[in-house]
Image (cartoon, helix red, strand yellow):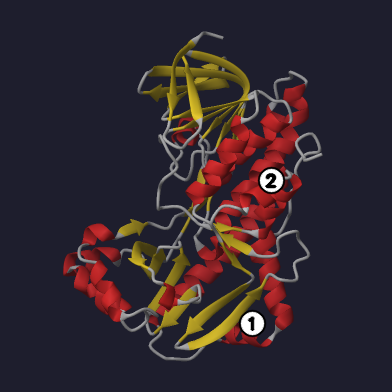
Amino acid sequence: MNGPLDEVKEDNGPVSTVFSGLDVDCCIVGGGPCGMMAGLLLARAGVRVAVLEKHVDFLRDFRGDTVHPSTLEVMAELGMLDELLKRPHTELKELTGDFFGKRVKLADFSELGTTAPFVALMPQWDFLDFLARQAAKLPQFTLLMGSEARSLVFDQGRVVGVRAAHAQGVVEVRAKATVVADGRDSLMRKQAGLPLRSYHSAVDVLWFRLSRTPEDGDQALGHVSRGCVLVLLNRGEYWQCACVVEKGRAQYYEQEGIESLRAKLRPILPLPPERLEELDGWNRVKLLSVEVNRLRRWARPGMLCIGDAAHAMSPVGGIGINLAVQDAVAAARLLTPLLRAGRTPSLWQLKRVQRRRSFVTHLTVRLQLLIQNQFLSGRLHDTSARIPWPVALLNRSPWLRRAAARFIGLGLRREHVPASAAAG
């Protein structure tokens, strides 16, 4: 191992030590929920880990805020749940929606039987900062912020590490296994030449914020009116808003001007109408282009893709983050024994993660696409004020609401923290 080039301390963030050359057991590309969780679990089990994150901090709006019961259960198994829940958050024990002015019940998390039977609405940067601070306590863990992975390092066709660009110079990390968790636009995945299957998405999302006052009260998460679907996330001092639009329709609103968007939102917004005046220009709005895809093969010799790098999910249900965390737990459980023993995982051993997770991913993608392209897209063209029959059925049936909560909150296959990383 070469000596450190520099040591960078981010304001209110973890210390990142940058090396010209670093040898570890596992190099993780991407410091999102998937990469950070995998790094924390591996380091807790005694595996030497380096996580490369291209940004210098975690402060980005374009991230989901829903920490589901499956992820909260992972934190409980790590013995960190109580500490995590000291961070500002809102607990959602029941998922409700507002359909044409009528409040309806969609999912009930209260009877899941988990340690924390609710969805925690927590800004993702808080969640990531918490994971980073917990991992920074471990001598086996290195976090390299502001280090953008630019190229894979190969040796006789096998991935043996990553080269990354940092303000202080080039960082080269060599590892027995390289885990790629750098998101839906993964450069490492493209360089590895792994085949990607994409699915048609009928909608996009316009992302913006509006101020919040105590008088706003407890709003339903989703609001549906004639030709409009709006989601509100409570971030304390402001509402993070997501307006679902038909694929490609955002260009129309941008060309017509911000007033066209305000006019669309006025009939559905459950806040004082003057709040929309805060949208005083298109620069207040960001477009989230919804992409849904999955890799046919998650691995090649020396390298494994997980999370959004392996399967970009729809925002429907906020499932993507939590599915990625489950990938991280599965990967850590399967790789830990090999890496602790100083062994280099074979391609067959790396593929075990895909064999365990791919069916769950495929089925979840299909269900999301059904809801997104049939239900959500249909609401954008529906001029009636009828509550869709599946929603009416959920509202009437406590059993169906519990089933919906199990799918949204726990997923189709739960992963548990490896014993070597679990608390006490």
| Picture residue at 76% right of the left edge, 25% below the top | 338
- Disc number placed over residue 419 in the picture, else none: none
Can residue 374 be seen from the camera position used here?
Answer: yes
Mark 1 — residue? 394
**Image quadrant containing the C terminus:** top right
Categorize mark 1 by other alpha carbons within 10 Å: few (<14), some (14-19), many (20+): some
| Picture residue at 70% right of the left edge, 36% below the top | 332
Task: State the residue in front, 162 or 147.
Answer: 147
| Picture residue at 48% right of the left edge, 47% below the top | 125
Task: State the residue in front, 226 or 350.
Answer: 226
Mark 1 or mark 2: which comes first in sequence? Answer: 2
Can residue 305 be seen from the camera position used here?
Answer: no
Mark 2 — residue? 80
Q: Quadrant of residue 238?
A: bottom left
**Image quadrant containing the N terminus:** top right
Q: Quadrant of residue 118?
A: bottom right
Helix, strand or loop at disc 2? loop
Q: Is residue 157 above or below residue 184?
A: above
Categorize mark 2 by other alpha carbons within 10 Å: few (<14), some (14-19), many (20+): some
Report the amino acid beneath label 1: Leu
